[in-house]
Image (cartoon, grey):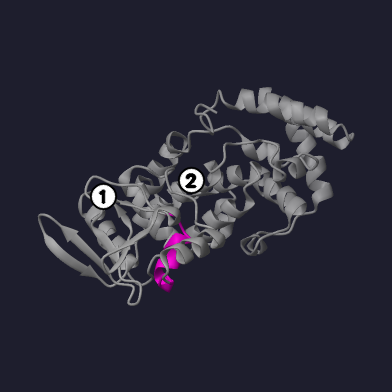
Amino acid sequence: MSENPEGPESYAESAVREVLMADDARVDAAVGYAALLLACVGAASESDRLVSRWQAVTSRPAVLLVPDEVTARAWGMLFAARGAPDWGGELPPLDLDAEERAHRKHLDAGGPLREQAAEAEDRAREGDLQGARCALARWAEQARLSARPDIATLAACRHVAPLLVQGTLAVADGWARDYAGTLIAALHTRYRTESRPLDWRELIERIMWLRGEPGNVPPPATHAGIDDAQRRLGVRLPPQYLEFLLTCDGLPADVAFPRLLGTAELFTGGHGVHISDPPGLVLLAESGRIVESDPLFGVTTHSGIRALLQEHLRLLEAAL
């Protein structure tokens, strides 16, 4: 690959351009390739999330993500190894024995990536899993020389597919989530609809994408961490704020938006819970309202954390 998978922002850049600017057929191709790549690095849940969001915003059938017989074969082998998700039921069923024989002919056509894929397949079929993993490592090194390596040919190897599902092609922690999230945010920008509100994860991902930081979404708070915070604060946090914390434990600052504190940093003072740094946002625990104090604009009361973040999103979108 021309970019290191540990850099999701740079790797996703070309795919985001396709989603935002290309025709629908190329959007489908970009999403299909990304979903397959995610599945091949052991991130099945992120792959399925990307496909489900693509379907939700486009209403297009999953078969459009499968442009050729090798890609269809790849998904068939991956589903055999991990189980088919709901969207996979839209794809035509395959005779995997026949597909395995056909794929051997495809591999025999040669080329560096096919040779490494064939070696990994042979090793895995013989039960030499360590040898197969070494061959996959060599495949990955060779693949980095290409901007869009042929991942379908690798995944269509019947005995290699289980290793891919297990995450043998390792990537950095959080890479798959950030890569999928970046593309989902781009899909929502292109196919924006006012009829369906964003869920919490989509809202945060879109904010961070518009900020230019798609890989900087904090992980969610734990239930234990929230319980500790509530005991320490002596208050029960309102349900909507809990939903926010269970999506991301705080939020980085932006040019005109303060850093939202994580659960371990929240503190009480005055009439509520201080949730920002610098101070200026106070959560009223009983009502869930947030009071914003600004030296220039005075005091504004938001109905809740979601209203505050939606206003932030509106300003980010207006700046595009």
Q: Measuring 64% from the left and 65% from the top, which residue is drawn there?
A: 86
Foreground residue, 93 or 220? 220
Outermost residue toward the right in this view: 126
Outermost residue toward the left in this view: 296
Question: In what quadrant of the picture does the N terminus appear?
Answer: top right
Mark 2 residue crowding within 10 angstroms, few (<14) / some (14–19) / many (20+): many
Residue 73 position (above or below residue 275): above
Asked whether the viewer can see residue 73, the reply is yes
Asked which secondary structure carries label 1, the reply is loop
The verdict on residue 246 being magenta is: yes
As shown in the figure, which amino acid type bears the numbered disc 1? Pro
The range drawn in magenta is 236-249
Residue 7 position (above or below residue 209): above
Residue 133, percent from left and from top: 76, 31
Residue 151, percent from left and from top: 63, 37
Asked which secondary structure carries label 2, the reply is helix
Q: How many marks?
A: 2
Q: Which residue is mark 1?
A: 278
